Structures are given as structure tokens and as C-alpha cells.
């Protein structure tokens, strides 16, 4: 996996230390490419990033985003993850609220079940999500 084989399309989100882009790999599919600037990481945060990678490598579950690999350059670390089309839960709730609606009970139960299945799979593998 090489960085030059990815084409970034759009910014999906950002946090204190990273940005996540929708990216295409060799025209074979869409991925979420997490870009972390190493200069923004202190020693503790740097080790947290590598712990995140180790944990992603261990996870085998259809209910948890899949890890595909990492790329390290002089100034950045990239984590390649499965891309899930659609919106995140926070945004879905916000859209419903803006329309003056609430999610149906059926939708809420479906989402809760998916979350619980993912947590169950993590716990089976001795991984605790915080």
C-alpha cells in the first residue's frame, strides 16, 4: 500500500490531531484515509495512535470498521479504514431534529442492536471501547 496509489476526494471529518478523507485506492474502491500530522503529536499521543492501529489489526467483526493498513511518511501517518457510505449517527439525529422529527423506535432499536453487536465482538476479543 503506497500513498501515491490513493486519490483524496473530500474531507469527511476532522479532530484535534487528524483529518479523515474519502479516498480511492487504485480505482478499486472507496476508503476512509485518516491523516495524522506527526508534528501535532506528543509522545503520549503518538503511542495512542500506534495502540489504535494495533487494536484495529486485531478486530475481526462485521460490525466494526475494517482496518486495511497504515502508511508512514516523514511528517504524517495515514491509517486506511473501511469507508461506510452515509452519515454518522450524530448527523442522522441532527437531520431528524432539523426536520422537527424524531427517529422511529424501530430505527433506534436497529441502531442499538448494531452498536451492541460491535461491542460484543470487541469484548470477545478482550478489547474495551471507551
Image: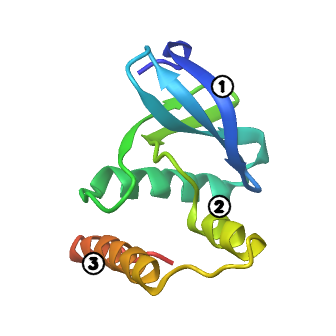
Q: Residue at x 50, y 29 (%)?
A: 71
Q: Position of residue 24 (x, y in %)?
A: 50, 23
Mark 2 Cα within 10 Å, few/some/many (few <14, many 20+)? Answer: few
- Screen quadrant of the N terminus: top left
Q: According to the image, label 1 marks what residue?
A: 74
Q: According to the image, label 3 marks what residue?
A: 120
In the image shown, does 20 or 45 lie closer to the viewer? 20
Tell whether 112 sits left or right of 62: right
Q: Secondary structure at mark 2?
A: helix
Numbered badge on residue 44: 2
Q: Position of residue 88 (x, y in %)?
A: 58, 60
Circle 3/circle 1 CB separation < 8 Å: no
Residue 37 in sight from this viewpoint: no
State which tag comes first along the sequence, 2 or 1. Answer: 2
Location of residue 86 with respect to 35 vertically, above or below = below
Q: Nearer the viewer, mark 3 or mark 1?
A: 3
Quarter of the image holding residue 35?
top right
Location of residue 58 with respect to 115 vertically, above or below = above
Location of residue 5 with respect to 73 vertically, above or below = above
Q: Residue at x 47, y 18 (%)?
A: 2
In the image shown, does 50 or 88 lie closer to the viewer? 88
Mark 3 Cα within 10 Å, few/some/many (few <14, many 20+)? Answer: some
Real-space CA distance between mark 2 and mark 1, rounded to the nearest whole angstrom: 19 Å
Colouring scheme applied when the structure was drawn: rainbow
Tell whether 25 sits left or right of 59: right
State which tag comes first along the sequence, 3 or 2. Answer: 2
Amino acid at each position: 500500500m503506497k500513498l501515491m496509489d490513493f486519490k483524496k476526494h473530500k474531507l469527511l471529518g476532522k479532530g484535534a490531531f487528524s483529518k479523515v478523507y474519502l479516498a480511492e485506492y487504485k480505482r478499486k474502491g472507496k476508503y476512509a484515509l485518516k491523516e495524522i500530522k506527526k508534528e501535532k503529536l506528543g509522545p503520549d499521543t503518538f503511542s495512542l495512535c500506534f495502540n489504535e492501529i494495533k487494536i484495529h489489526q486485531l478486530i475481526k467483526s462485521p460490525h466494526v470498521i475494517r482496518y486495511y493498513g497504515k502508511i508512514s511518511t516523514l511528517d504524517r501517518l495515514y491509517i486506511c479504514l473501511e469507508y461506510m457510505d452515509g452519515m454518522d449517527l450524530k448527523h442522522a439525529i441532527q437531520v431528524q431534529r432539523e426536520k422537527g422529527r424524531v427517529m422511529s423506535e424501530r430505527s433506534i432499536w436497529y441502531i442499538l442492536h448494531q452498536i451492541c453487536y460491535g461491542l460484543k465482538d470487541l469484548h470477545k476479543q478482550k478489547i474495551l471501547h471507551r
